[in-house]
Image: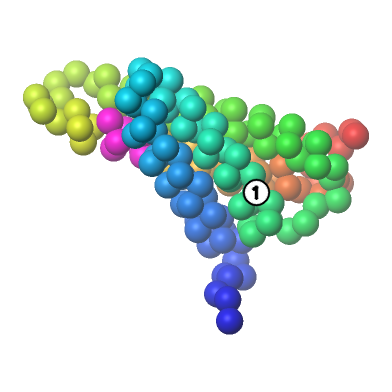
């Protein structure tokens, strides 16, 4: 028997947690060959793809909106959340006065904080825009 919580907010935490974990873990190998901000940006995009499929299939009720509108709105919501992730991560990392030798902890902590705060934007954006029914969504043009 599978355990799938009835409350979509709980399902969102699990699905979003999984997508966020992918986002966070993918950044480490990207750090080997690109700057930190670029690695966070690419990792965020990969996390977005994982998030779309997990939210669509495990979190929100099926919608009558076309898949193309869902993808468009998913990208828009995640673009806003992605910008928040990168800005927050880089801003925290660049705060002055981090003790010497702490950057190995500061960078993943800053990235995780950015992801966590952006999750709030994601939940409400996807609930009320991306995966809303055609009559609930702010724009229902096909």
Q: Secondary structure at mark 1?
A: helix
Q: Is residue 141 left or right of residue 90?
A: right
Quadrant for residue 80, please give it.
top right
Per the image, the residue denoted by label 1 is 53
Q: Position of residue 126 (x, y in %)?
A: 66, 44
The verdict on residue 98 being magenta is no
In the image, 37 versus 115, the foreground residue is: 37
Q: Position of residue 107 (x, y in %)?
A: 28, 30
Q: Is residue 7 left or right of residue 104?
A: right
Q: Residue at 65% of width from left, 49% of height from top?
A: 53
Identify whether 51 is placed above or below 101. Answer: below
In the image, 121 versus 65, the foreground residue is: 65
In this picture the colour scheme is rainbow
In the image, 29 versus 130, the foreground residue is: 29
Q: Residue at 36% of width from left, 21% of height from top?
A: 33
- Outermost residue on the right side: it is 142
Identify whether 19 is placed above or below 108. Answer: below
Q: Residue at 19% of width from left, 28% of height from top?
A: 103
Q: Quadrant of the N terminus?
A: bottom right
- Please indicate, yes or no, whether residue 128 appears anywhere in the rendered image: yes
Q: Position of residue 84 (x, y in %)?
A: 48, 28
- Please indicate, yes or no, whether residue 84 appears anywhere in the rendered image: no
Identify whether 78 is placed above or below 4. Answer: above
Q: Residue at 9% of width from left, 24% of height from top?
A: 100
Q: Position of residue 83 (x, y in %)?
A: 51, 25
Quadrant for residue 57, please give it.
bottom right
Q: Quadrant of the C terminus?
A: top right
Q: Is residue 73 left or right of residue 45?
A: right
The magenta segment: 107-113
């Amino acid at each position: 028997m599978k355990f799938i919580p009835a409350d979509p907010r709980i399902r969102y935490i699990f699905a979003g947690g999984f997508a966020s974990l992918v986002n966070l873990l993918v950044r480490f190998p990207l750090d080997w060959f690109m700057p930190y901000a670029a690695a966070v940006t690419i990792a965020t995009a990969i996390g977005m793809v994982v998030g779309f499929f997990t939210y669509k299939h495990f979190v929100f009720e099926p919608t009558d909106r076309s898949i193309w509108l869902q993808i468009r709105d998913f990208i828009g919501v995640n673009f806003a959340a992605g910008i928040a992730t990168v800005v927050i991560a880089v801003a925290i990392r660049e705060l002055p006065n981090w003790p010497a030798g702490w950057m190995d902890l500061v960078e993943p902590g800053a990235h995780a904080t950015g992801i966590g705060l952006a999750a709030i934007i994601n939940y409400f954006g996807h609930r009320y825009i991306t995966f809303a029914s055609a009559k609930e969504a702010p724009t229902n043009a096909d």
